[in-house]
Image (cartoon, rainbow, N blue to C red):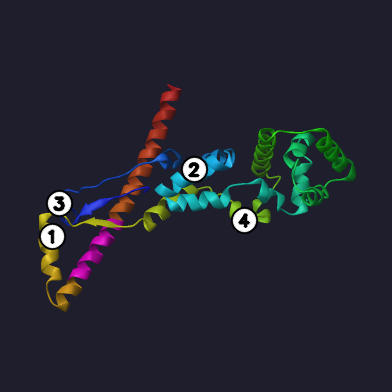
């Protein structure tokens, strides 16, 4: 789990807090720009390895895993775009790279994709495809190059994701958004194992309906307190990351 904070009943009412935080691989990507770095890592990884990464991420934060999976750029997504966007890509990608990436694909799909190009450019690609015989590894490398080029076109403004696929857009402050969402959706756990807590719960649970209602109100209060404290922990962690980055910058300058 991305973060797990356990509070005892006594700690929530003012006594020392007992908390456990489980940190994982996502910590290094929570700073500004980290989401894009992680997205690039996933996009350039083989499918099997990518799914392994996503599985690890899901174990820490399903919110991050869902956001990444939605925004991962795949060649299948690119091929599904409208012809006006494909021609912008294909006309800028090296012909041999495109030919190797398309090699072995269904003839109908190749015809449909290359129909976006002028006849001369289309003929050049088909001739290269007939002459070349890339290995699976070479084809995979060429696909990765195309995806890298597409990311570059997006960064340069040549391709506009709001017109192509708004779901692929990465908000500037997405790390902060996801961290907040992750904490808000994280399950709350209360540790009722202390002697004082057990006696308090026993007294409440053993009463009549009025006592049960009071007990439920008490539990609701503790849950709200946990959420409040969780938010404070999140804010402190973010501040700590910012300070670390500034310190690193100072060290580099010195």
Q: SS for tag 1?
A: helix
Q: Position of residue 196 (x, y in %)?
A: 10, 57
Q: Nearer the viewer, mark 2 or mark 4?
A: 2
Q: Which residue is mark 2?
A: 52
Q: SS for tag 4?
A: helix
Q: Is residue 204 left or right of residue 251?
A: left
Which numbered circle lies on residue 198?
1
Q: CA distance from mark 3 to mark 1?
A: 16 Å
Which numbered circle lies on residue 15?
3
Q: CA distance from mark 1 to mark 2?
A: 42 Å
Say if the magenta span includes residue 224: yes
The numbered mark, 3 or 4, whose residue comes first in the sequence reads: 3
Q: Nearer the viewer, mark 3 or mark 1?
A: 1
Q: SS for tag 3?
A: loop
Contact flag, marks 3 and 4 (Cβ < 8 Å): no
Which numbered circle lies on residue 238?
none
Is the residue marked by circle 1 packed among few (<14), some (14-19), or many (20+) residues within 10 Å? some
Is the residue marked by circle 2 packed among few (<14), some (14-19), or many (20+) residues within 10 Å? few
Q: Position of residue 237 (x, y in %)?
A: 35, 43
Residue found at the very far right of the displayed protein: 120
Q: Nearer the viewer, residue 138 or 184?
A: 138
Residue found at the very far top of the displayed protein: 254
- Stretch in magenta: 215-227
Q: Is residue 96 left or right of residue 24?
A: right
Residue drawn at 45 percent across, 23 percent down = 253
């Amino acid at each position: 789990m991305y973060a797990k904070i356990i509070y005892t009943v006594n700690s929530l009412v003012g006594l020392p807090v007992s908390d456990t935080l489980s940190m994982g691989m996502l910590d290094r990507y929570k700073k500004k720009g980290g989401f894009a770095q992680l997205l690039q890592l996933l996009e350039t990884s083989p499918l099997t390895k990518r799914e392994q990464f996503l599985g690890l991420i899901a174990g820490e934060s399903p919110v991050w895993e869902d956001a990444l999976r939605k925004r991962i750029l795949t060649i299948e997504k690119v091929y599904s775009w409208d012809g006006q966007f494909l021609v912008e890509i294909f006309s800028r990608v090296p012909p041999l790279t495109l030919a190797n990436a398309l090699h072995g694909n269904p003839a109908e799909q190749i015809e449909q994709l290359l129909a976006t190009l002028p006849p001369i450019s289309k003929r050049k690609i088909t001739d290269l495809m007939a002459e070349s015989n890339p290995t699976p590894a070479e084809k995979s490398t060429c696909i990765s190059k195309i995806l890298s080029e597409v990311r570059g076109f997006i960064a340069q403004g040549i391709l506009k994701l709001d017109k192509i696929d708004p779901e692929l857009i990465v908000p500037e402050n997405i790390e902060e958004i996801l961290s907040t969402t992750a904490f808000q959706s994280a399950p709350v756990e209360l540790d009722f194992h202390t002697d004082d807590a057990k006696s308090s719960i026993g007294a409440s649970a053993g009463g009549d309906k009025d006592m049960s209602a009071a007990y439920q109100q008490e539990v609701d209060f503790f849950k709200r307190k946990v959420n409040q404290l969780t938010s404070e922990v999140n804010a402190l962690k973010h501040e700590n990351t910012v300070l670390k980055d500034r310190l690193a910058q100072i060290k580099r300058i010195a």
